[in-house]
Each structure stands twice: as C-alpha cells, then as structure tokens.
Image (cartoon, coloured by chain):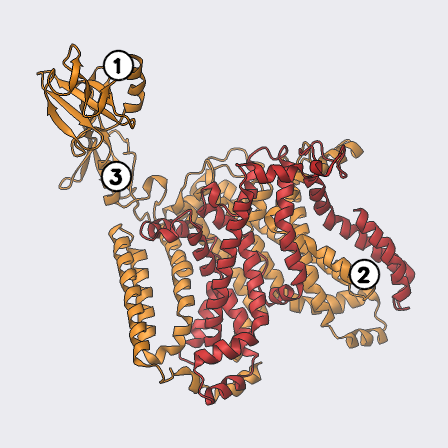
C-alpha cells in the first residue's frame, strides 16, 4: 500500500509536465485518484499475504501489516521453515509434481498440435473443412463436464495400463493433453496460414520432404505462436484444480493447487502464515513469467482462449 | 488472409501426396511399430470388453483401426500428421462426451457401478461362518514371522493343522509336533509354529478373527470363543431361475432389471446392485423430485446471474481502467503491470488469499470494519452477502483481463473519427456512448460471451472461496449451498463429501449444462461470424 502511494505522488508530478495541454489539470487529479484506488484494490491482497508470510506469529488473529516483535531474520522465516519441514505438507514434492505434469502436458500439446496445424494449413484433402469445423465444435464441450466419464474411463483403462491409472500423473497428463488439442490447433493454424507458402514450395522444389520442410523451415518460423501456446498451456495446466483433485488421491501425488487447497480443510486460520509462505513461493515465479511474457499472453488471449 | 489463402489454393496438390522416397527398411520399421501398437490396442480393447465395457473397447478398436488405415494408405498422408491429435480427441473428448450421455440414461452410482456378472462375481466372494454349525475346537499357533496357524480338533477326535499359506493337513493329537502336549493333545510347537497360551492367545484372537485358514477353496476360520468352522459362500446365484440366495437366512432375491437390484420378497436389496439403462429416469428426477428440483432452479438462476454480473462488473472496471490508462504518461507501463498482477497469480492461490481475508471472525476485512464501524458484512453466513463476496472476488480476478483486451481494442479505434465527431460538436460523453462503446463492443463482444461461458462453468471460485455455502436449508444429501453453481452442484453429486456418488444423475445435469453452454457458444459464433469466416478462409 505504501509503495502505491509513493508511486502516485511521484508520477503525479511528472504527468502534469508531460501531458498534452489538451487535458485539464482537474482531470489529471481524478485520473490519479482512480488509479490509486485501483492499485490499492489490486495490490492489497498481495501485500497482505506477503506480510502474513513473514509474520512470525503465524495465525490470522495475530497478523499486523508490518510484522511485530521481530528480533532476527530467522523469526521472519519461521513460516517458511515450518512449510518446508512439515511432513504433512510435502511442498517441494507438490511443486515438483505440478512442474512435471504441466511441463510434460505442455510439451506434448505443443508438438502434437503443431503437427496437426501444419497439415491443416498446408495440405488440401477432402474432409479438411468438416474436420476443422468439428474440432471447433468439440471445444464447446469442456472436459470438466465429462468428469464422471473421464473418471470411470481411467478406472477401466487403469486396470490394464498402470501408466494411466487413477491417482497417477500419467492419467492427469493424458486428460490435459486430450483437452488441450482443439483450441490450440486453431490458434496455431491461424499463425501457420500467415507464413507464405513460397517458403515450403521452394524447399520442395529443392527435394525436401514435407517432414524436412516442417521441421527445419516452418517450425523455427512459428516460434512466436509456439511460445503463446506453450505459456497458455503451461499456466493453464499448472492452475487446473478440478480434474487434478478428482484424479489424484494420495497426498504424495497431489499437484500444488490440490495441496494448497488442503489447507482450507485443516486449521486454515491457524496455519495462515504457513499457507501464506506457500502461496508466496508458488505464485512468485508464475507472476514473473506472466509479466515477462505479457505480450505473448495478451496476443493469445485475444484470439479466443480465456484464462482457466 | 483470405486472399492469400485463395492464392495458394491453386497450387497445393503437390504437398498432399507422400513423397516416393520411402525405402524398404523404413517401411518395415513402420509396419513393425504399427503391428505392435495394434496388438496392444486389440489386447486392451478385448480386456476392457471382457469387463463388460463394450463401448470403451469398441472406441479403442475404432481408434486403432483409424490409425492403421491412415498409416497404410498413402493417399491419407495428411491425416498421418493429425493422427495423434485425432486419436487423443476421440478418446478423451468424444468418448467421454458420448459416455456421459450414455451414463445419464443409466442408474450408474456407487452401489450400481458393475455389470450384473461383475456384481455376482463380487457377491460370490463374500463368505461367512455359519453359527451353531462349527465343528472344531481351536488353538492358535504363531511362527517367528508373526504368521498365524490353527490347530483344529473335531468332535470325533480327528485333528487338523491349517495355516495361511494353503496347508490343511490331518495331524494326530499327542503325536504330531513337539512335546510337551497339553490335555487335548495339542503340541507346544508344530512345523516352526508355537502354541499361544494365556494372554498371548487372547490377544491373538483379535488378529485372527475373520482370517481364513487352510485350503483357499474351502477355508476355515474362528467362529466364536470356543469353536471354529468352515466358511460358507454367502450369496449363491441360480442361473436357471435367476434367483440369488442369501444362504445366511435363505432369502431368495430376484433380479430386478428395471432398477438394477437384487430384491428379496420383503423388499430388501442385496448390498451390491448392477447398472442398467433406466431411460429418462434421471432427467425425470431433475424435473419432478421436489427436493432436488427446488434447489436446482435456484442453482440455475444463480449460475446465470453470477456469470452475467461477473462479466458486467469486470468489463466495466476493466474498460474504466483501460480508458484511464489510454493516455501516455510517465509511469503508465508500471501502473499497468501492477494492475495485471491479480490476473497473473494462479487462481487457486488468489481465491484462498481472499478466503482468508474475508474470514468472518479473524479476517482482516471483518476485524477492521468491526473496529471502524462496529459492523462487518457476514460474507460467509448470509446468502446475499456470500453472493456479493463471490462477485467481488471474481471482479478482482478478471478485471485485468478486460483491461488488457480493452486497451488493445481502444488503440485500434482510429482517432480520425473522434476528430470528426469533435467538429460536429460532440461532448466527451457523446463520444464515449456513441463511438467508443459501440466500436469496442464489436471487437470485444465475442470475448464477453466467452467470458460468460467460462464463468458459467466456474467451479474453482465457488468451491475454493465458499465451498458453495451457506447451505440451503432443507436440501437432502448432498448439501446444496446458496452460491453453488451448476458445475459445483454436479460435482457434489458425483464426488462431493457426503454425496451419493450418483454418477448417472450427475451426468444428466452435465448434459443439460452442455446444451446451455452449446447454445451460448452458438450465439457467440453468430456474433463473431466465425463460421462464415471459416467458410471464406478454408
């Protein structure tokens, strides 16, 4: 909160100097008041959770914005130490699970959808149009609606293929990858279409196969869209909760989101500090990723995907 | 883009044929991989069909067949590129959708999750020890590893030794095993097992209760403090008469193919039923059962209201911030980045942070408002305030999205039209309502509908923030809350704590949601004219 007021004061002075003479000074003040309110609304929960993470008392009742009675750095880190040592909260394990699941899903989604998008963009074959339309229609049915069917299917398949059994990461990855096909094929196809076909044709004239053309020429050219799809898929699967909760039952196998949700079941207000520490550690890298890749994400979002 | 696509259309037949460079080893390798893949698919399909899940098995076979055809026929070369994606979509999107529809017409639930054969097989495994029929006196033995065994003496003086590894052998009292023998002729140890006496015997009794000893086909166990007996199969099914008999009390249960239960003359049902098609029963229950349809209507109305108000509030806030930040001034980029942070934090984490802050007893908002005004909103206990809280948190979560979208859209509106409007004497307000907003809605409109659809299915917020609560008074299990939306309602029926695990009913609700969402998406397509655009571009 304090940081927002200082920026407000600081920037307010400069804006008057740089603003076009068209806008009156009064409007500027109104604008900065709105910005200040918005910043407080947006950032207060963030500051509050950061303060909770460093509050040595650890419970919700005793929290103050600035931690009291702190004598040493160790005391500031009490919650983090509890988080990393509590056997009931295998935090690193959950984080590792999340990264494995999201990373594998993302890699598979990017590779498989790129192959399909290339075919849709470059080849002309009968049934192409109807197939594209069907894929568009398929995405109307979100896979969380089919949670019961997916759950029962995993029970059945899991009897014979342990890799995809319930309570395994393989099952979760399989479901994420299957659900991530249609939107991303469309996203990628649009971008592939914008790459001139002359490139392919000149390569083909030189004797390259379709595969060589794809892998050595087109794939490097479409990296911006690969990045968009990868970031959206990674953040999306990292944040997914419902399917992860249904599929993963053992504490050891949980993803981070399922693990953090578990705090609510227990003594939430007493474990508030530990939860805050976990939230801070988990959210910071994702926020940084988001802010640094903002350009790509906004581009991807406007094409049609909504944050999951 | 459409012109470019039209341009290429003439010259594209070249790429769609497989190049003739594939050589023999390559081909053999491909066929080998295909053979292995097909063999595993067939094995999996046959196994699954053997369990009675014909639908899934057929789907696996069809997918394998499709992949085989695509790999073998050169003309289908383009499909080879798409085959992984298509296979995944068939198995994980199409099949679950079809299966959801199918389950919605069955009584699939926790007590009815097996086929009739499977249910009978499971029932036939249940065994019991008939009381009063016990034929042996028993002594407990234990070996060094803690494994138990029984020394059994019949009324006629014959004795047997039975362990957990399948041994059931005749022994002779006072001769078999190692001395000393007790009054009944039981040895102190036999085959590495030692006789338990006194307190040890008493303690072991608790462990041994219910365990089966001896020949697995004809197991023996301890029935009471002084008698052991042969286990009996409790449920016996007569194929010809279609009667399941409970041998414990000789009640005949007939097979009811309407409800998927085994029913006794006194109306009692066997502990395990089987699933059968029940037609429109689940849908009938949605609309007829007062206990269920009462909350369902409320849940439905709230789902729509929640999605609508979420979109309106976050769009308004996002647009306002986009307008405020639409001028270039120093620090605008920093402000924008800071305002995006709520959107960048993983949703689950943000929602739980709010859950803590809104805690009615010790949360920061309640305590401070109480200190300042002597009153705090009862966010988690009052239905109205709970709805307000859910909307407030969703505003926080989603306004940055609309801010980003609107910023982009605002910049694409040419400034010349504003200049023209100014010449005509338009005020700032006129310009906003008559130019900015209509132009913005053209480009942002589809995303508003997409966001509506997303919030229609927003499970995470409802579940993680308030758990659907506060509960609606008078609803049966599972408990339904005032902030539950359709998807969390479905979840409670299928997976919720205290829920009924009624998969058939949950699927029926999912089908209804699907039609609603499908209708919304159709509207969205209409508005975006995306379908027409496809028509031009493909």
- Residue B11 or residue B410, whichever sits in front: B11
Q: Which chain is orange?
A: B
Task: Name the residue at 83% across, 64% down.
Answer: B329
Q: Secondary structure at mark 3?
A: helix
Relative to A39, say whether B477 is above or below. above
Q: Residue furthest top?
A: B183
Question: Can marks 1 and 2 be said to lie on one chain?
Answer: yes
In the rendered image, which residue does mark 1 sit on? B197
Q: Position of residue B401 (x, y in %)?
A: 66, 59
Q: Please report, as a chain letter, where disc 2 is located.
A: B
In the rendered image, which residue does mark 3 sit on? B122
Q: Position of residue B522 (x, y in %)?
A: 52, 64
Q: Position of residue B529 (x, y in %)?
A: 56, 72
Q: Determine which quarter of the picture holds residue B184.
A: top left
Task: Name the residue at 62% across, 40% down.
Answer: A275
Left or right: where does residue A159 sit relative to residue A145? left
- Residue B256 or residue B66, whichever sits in front: B66
């Amino acid at each position: 909160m304090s940081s927002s007021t200082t920026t407000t004061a600081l920037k307010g002075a400069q804006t008057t100097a740089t603003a076009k003479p068209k806008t009156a000074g009064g409007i500027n003040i109104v604008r900065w008041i709105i910005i200040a309110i918005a910043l407080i609304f947006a950032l207060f929960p963030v500051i509050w959770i950061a303060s909770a993470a460093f509050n040595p008392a650890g419970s919700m009742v005793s929290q103050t914005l600035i931690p009291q009675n702190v004598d040493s750095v160790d005391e500031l880190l009490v919650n983090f130490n509890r988080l990393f040592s509590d056997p009931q909260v295998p935090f690193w394990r959950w984080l590792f699970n999340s990264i494995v699941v999201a990373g594998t899903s993302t890699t598979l989604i990017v590779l498989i959808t790129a192959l399909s998008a290339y075919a849709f963009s470059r080849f002309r074959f009968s049934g192409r149009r109807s197939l594209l339309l069907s894929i568009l229609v398929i995405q109307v049915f979100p896979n969380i609606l089919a949670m019961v069917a997916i759950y029962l299917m995993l029970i059945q398949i899991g009897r014979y293929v342990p890799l995809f059994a319930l309570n395994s990461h393989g099952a979760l990855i399989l479901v994420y990858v299957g659900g991530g096909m249609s939107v991303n094929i469309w996203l990628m196809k649009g971008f592939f279409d914008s790459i001139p076909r002359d490139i392919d044709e000149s390569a083909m004239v030189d004797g390259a196969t379709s595969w060589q053309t794809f892998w050595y020429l087109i794939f490097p050219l479409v990296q911006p869209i690969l990045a968009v799809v990868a970031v959206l898929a990674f953040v999306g699967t990292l944040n997914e909760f419902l399917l992860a909760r249904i599929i993963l039952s053992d504490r050891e196998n949980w993803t981070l989101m399922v693990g953090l949700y578990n705090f609510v079941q227990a003594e939430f207000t007493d474990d508030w500090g530990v939860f805050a520490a976990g939230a801070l550690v988990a959210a910071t890298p994702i926020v940084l990723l988001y802010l640094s890749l903002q350009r790509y994400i906004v581009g991807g979002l406007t094409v049609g995907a909504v944050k999951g | 883009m459409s012109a470019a696509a039209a341009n290429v259309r003439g010259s594209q037949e070249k790429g769609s044929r497989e190049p003739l460079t594939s050589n023999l080893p390559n081909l053999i390798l491909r066929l080998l991989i295909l053979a292995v893949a097909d063999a595993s698919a067939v094995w999996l399909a046959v196994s699954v069909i053997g369990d009675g899940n014909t639908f899934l098995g057929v789907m696996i076979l069809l997918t394998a067949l499709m992949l085989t055809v695509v790999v073998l026929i050169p003309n289908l070369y383009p499909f080879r590129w798409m085959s992984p994606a298509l296979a995944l979509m068939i198995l994980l999107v199409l099949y679950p959708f079809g299966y959801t529809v199918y389950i919605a017409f069955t009584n699939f639930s926790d007590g009815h999750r097996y086929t009739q054969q499977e249910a009978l097989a499971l029932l036939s495994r249940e065994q019991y020890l008939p009381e009063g029929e016990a034929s042996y006196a028993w002594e407990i033995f234990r070996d060094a590893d803690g494994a138990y065994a029984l020394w059994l003496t019949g009324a006629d003086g014959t004795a047997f030794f039975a362990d957990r590894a399948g041994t059931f052998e005749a022994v002779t009292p006072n001769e078999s095993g190692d001395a000393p023998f007790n009054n009944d002729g039981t040895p102190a140890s036999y085959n590495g097992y030692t006789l338990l006496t006194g307190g040890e015997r008493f303690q072991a009794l608790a462990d041994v209760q219910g365990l089966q000893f001896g020949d697995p086909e004809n197991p023996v166990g301890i029935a009471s403090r002084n008698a052991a007996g042969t286990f009996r199969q409790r449920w016996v099914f007569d194929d010809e008469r279609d009667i399941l008999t409970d041998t414990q009390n000789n009640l005949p249960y007939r097979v009811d193919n309407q409800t998927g239960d085994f029913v006794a003359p006194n109306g009692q049902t066997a502990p395990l039923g089987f699933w059968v098609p029940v037609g429109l029963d689940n849908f009938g229950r949605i609309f007829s059962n007062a206990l269920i349809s009462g909350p369902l209507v409320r849940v439905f109305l709230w789902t729509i209201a929640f999605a609508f108000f979420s979109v309106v509030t976050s769009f308004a806030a996002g647009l306002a911030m986009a307008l405020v930040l639409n001028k270039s001034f120093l620090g605008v980029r920093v402000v924008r980045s800071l305002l995006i942070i709520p959107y960048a934090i993983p949703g689950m984490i943000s929602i739980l942070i709010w859950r803590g802050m809104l805690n009615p007893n010790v949360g920061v908002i309640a305590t401070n408002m109480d200190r300042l005004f002597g009153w705090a909103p009862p966010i988690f206990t009052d239905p109205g305030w709970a709805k307000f809280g859910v909307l407030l948190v969703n505003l926080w979560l989603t306004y940055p999205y609309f801010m980003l979208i609107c910023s982009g859209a605002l910049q694409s509106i040419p400034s010349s039209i504003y200049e023209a409007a100014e010449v005509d004497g338009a005020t700032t307000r006129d310009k906003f309502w008559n130019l900015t907003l209509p132009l913005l809605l053209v480009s942002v409109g589809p995303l508003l509908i997409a966001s509506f659809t997303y919030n229609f299915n927003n499970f995470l917020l409802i579940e993680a923030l308030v758990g659907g609560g506060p509960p609606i008074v008078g609803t049966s299990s599972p408990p339904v809350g005032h902030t539950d939306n359709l998807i969390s309602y479905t979840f409670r029926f299928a997976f919720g704590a205290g829920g009924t695990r009624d998969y058939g009913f949950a699927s029926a609700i999912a089908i209804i949601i699907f039609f609603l969402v499908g209708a919304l998406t159709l509207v969205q397509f209409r508005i975006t004219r995306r379908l027409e655009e496809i028509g031009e571009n493909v």
